[in-house]
Amino acid sequence: MHDNWLIFCEESGDKALPWKKGSTDYYIVSAVLVHEEHEQDFINTIKHQTKRVLKISEPLEWKKLQTYKKRDDILLAKFFKNVEQSAPPFIISKVICNKHETSGPGLVDTQTFMNYLYGLMFKRISLFLRITKSHAKLVIDRNTDPVAQESLRKYLSDVAKYKTGEPPRFSKPKWLNPEDHAILGLSDFIAGSSLRSLSDYYHNVNIECKRCSSGLCIYECSKSNFSYFRSYKYLVDWNYYNFENWAWKGLLYHPFENKNNYRHLFMPI
């Protein structure tokens, strides 16, 4: 019997590449995977914790969250922890692109850049679905132009077929607004809070600390002024799942020579 998953994809950051002043330092694509039969339970959990912890009755959406709450790390950590403990099983997958380290003539086009990063995500998801003999329905934020939507739809099908040697195990994307579905809203929230966390790190940590030989330098080194970690560590921890023949572990980080180096930035404790 095959598992049926739902996959909700969102993004955060602007697509300006190469980086220029005023652009976001990172661009993040996030995906939330949940079993189809758990969809409503997951929705109920998100809505309940949004109202209970964040004290908002509107649909969960990062850009609409008050600024002081975006900066309240303890509040965000509590929200993520409560969702983790109350929700049915779910998976978080993310592609993190450091735009300061990303270059190349093939990525300067906005459409190509978006397709490339989503492609990294879905190469991994396609293999996961194949190895676990699963299928999935795909939901993506509609806040992109129609030409890019059609291009991405075709690109994801081509990526899946090339990587797995078979037709894709996920449906053609369904395009929704984050406020129209609570799980898509959570994916948006995760992408937004991740961008904020990584930007805080980039601007606040002492550069020399990044070269420290200690894996715990950001927690132990007296030269580092970076202390933001409580909420982001949940987003890292959610990537640790083991299925039959498949270990869903870690984040995807671009450029490739630094892939999975989040361990040196946000070591879960």
Image: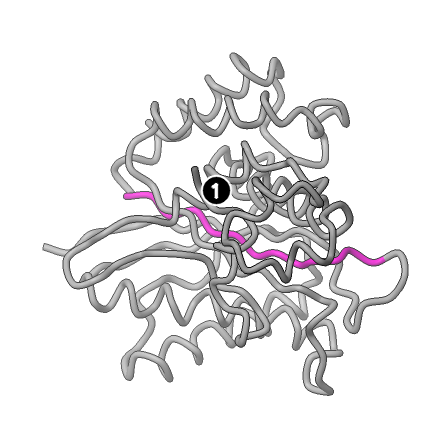
Q: Residue drawn 53% across and 75% down?
A: 256
Q: State the extent of the magenta-drawn residues as a range.
A: 23-35
Q: Residue drawn 46% across and 37% down?
A: 234
Prevailing secondary structure class for the magenta stretch in the rendered image: strand
Q: Residue 264 location in percent, x, y?
A: 53, 55
Q: Residue under circle 1? A: 235
Q: How many marks?
A: 1
Q: Nearer the viewer, residue 250 or 10?
A: 250
- SS assignment at label 1: helix
**Quadrant holding the C terminus:** top left
Q: Residue 222 location in percent, x, y?
A: 67, 41
Crowding near the residue tagged with mark 1, few <14, some 14–19, many ≥20 C-alpha atoms within 10 Å: many
Is 229 drawn above or below residue 217 in the view shown? above
Quarter of the image holding residue 196?
A: top right
Q: Residue 233 location in percent, x, y?
A: 49, 39
Residue type at mark 1: give it.
Leu
In this rendering, position of residue 178 left or right of residue 49? right
